[in-house]
Amino acid sequence: MSEKQKDILSSMIFLIIGVAVFAYSATIQTVIKADVGPAFAPKIVTMGIIILAVVKLGLSIKKNTPEYTKKSTKNENTLNGLLTIVALGLYVALFNVLGFIISSALYLFFQMYLLMSAEKRNYIIMGIISITVPVCIYFLFVKAFSLMLPAGLLG
């Protein structure tokens, strides 16, 4: 299966899932009348999934470069998939020990390293993104939403 076929298939699957979850979220009953009911968050998330799936589907159909339409190397993709699963397991295992910021930064850096081709890797940019994103998310959740995330070694 080519990358184009995989992208089209995955876009269609996410589109179907998004529509199904959106329809199901409409059946959530509200117990207390409020501005924002319990169905609000699922509807917002599924709208995002639907929009992104449609955009990805359109881009996948439109793109026709030879590299994109040729069959992918299965061994490299399988190895990257297994390494991603291992990285997620380590992320979960070290989340409370290292804290949100450190564990997320390490995971993001490793995942970017895995997903980028060797010629496109820019370690400085990868490092900046890996540190900036978890720090911003941490302060957004802690300061704006008053939710606690594990501080770990930094706490």
Image (cartoon, rainbow, N blue to C red):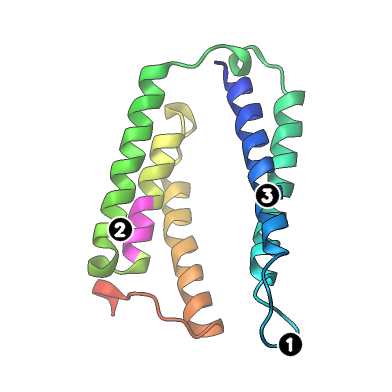
Amino acid at pointer 1: Lys
As drawn, is 99 to the left or to the right of 4?
Answer: left
Residues rendered magenta in the picture: 102-107
- Disc 1 is placed on an element classified as loop
- Disc 2 is placed on an element classified as helix
As drawn, is 90 to the left or to the right of 119?
Answer: left
Q: Quadrant of the N terminus?
A: top right
Q: Quadrant of the C terminus?
A: bottom left
Q: Is residue 120 above or below residue 96?
A: above
Q: Is residue 150 above or below residue 113?
A: below
Q: Mark 2 = which residue?
A: 92
Q: Position of residue 117 (x, y in %)?
A: 46, 29
Q: Mark 3 = which residue?
A: 20
Mark pair 2, 3: CA separation: 29 Å
As drawn, is 30 to the left or to the right of 122?
Answer: right
Q: Mark 1 = which residue?
A: 33
Residue beneath the point at 36% across and 67% down = 100
Residue 103 in the magenta stretch? The answer is yes
Mark pair 2, 1: CA separation: 37 Å
Q: Is residue 23 above or below residue 17?
A: below
Q: Position of residue 34 (x, y in %)?
A: 73, 87
